[in-house]
Image (tube, helix red, strand yellow):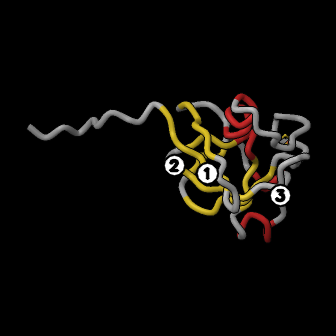
């Protein structure tokens, strides 16, 4: 029998480009909250999608935006794959590039 309802993964893997760092994001959690829970010094201020501090570049994979990034990011950033980590829900394993805080 054909199964049309494949179980979805309960979490996805994130790898940070140019580092050995990886962490997991539970389904439905934001990229930023999972990074912070994993102890990663990801830059952020507002956590609600208004400051742009948490932006990172999506290198590979799929996310779902919780709001229109166009309110904060300019068109060239969006075309270059920049996303807001606090407003991104993963739809696959991803690779991102981010400038971590020291
Ligand atoms: S922390 Fe402000 S936009 Fe994400």
Quickly name the residue at label 3: 73
Expressed as whole percent of the image width and height from the top left, the position of residue 29 reads 62, 31
Mark 1 vs ligand 1: CB below 8 Å: no
Quickly name the residue at label 2: 93
Expressed as whole percent of the image width and height from the top left, the position of residue 26 reads 55, 31
Secondary-structure class at tag 3: loop
Rounded to the nearest angstrom, the CA distance separating label 1 from label 3 is 23 Å
Earlier along the polypeptide chain: callout 1 or callout 3?
1
| Residue drawn at 57 percent across, 37 percent down | 24
* Displayed quadrant of residue 75: bottom right
Quickly name the residue at label 1: 15
| Discs 2/3, front | 2
> Is 68 left, or right, of 64 in this rendering?
right
| Residue drawn at 83 percent across, 55 percent down | 99
CB atoms at circles 2 and 1 under 8 Å apart? yes
Badge 2 density bin: few <14, some 14–19, many ≥20, Cα 10 Å: some
> Is 25 left, or right, of 50 in this rendering?
left
Rounded to the nearest angstrom, the CA distance separating label 2 from label 1 is 8 Å
Q: Quadrant of ligand 1?
A: top right
| Discs 2/1, front | 1
């Amino acid at each position: 029998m054909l199964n049309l309802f494949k179980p979805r993964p309960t979490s996805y893997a994130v790898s940070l480009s140019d580092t050995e760092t990886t962490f997991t994001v539970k389904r439905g959690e934001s990229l930023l909250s999972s990074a912070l829970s994993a102890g990663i010094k990801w830059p952020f201020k507002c956590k609600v999608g208004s400051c742009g501090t948490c932006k990172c570049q999506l290198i590979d994979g799929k996310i779902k935006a919780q709001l229109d990034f166009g309110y904060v990011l300019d068109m060239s950033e969006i075309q270059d794959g920049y996303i807001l980590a606090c407003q991104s829900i993963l739809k696959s394993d991803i690779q991102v590039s981010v400038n971590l805080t020291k």
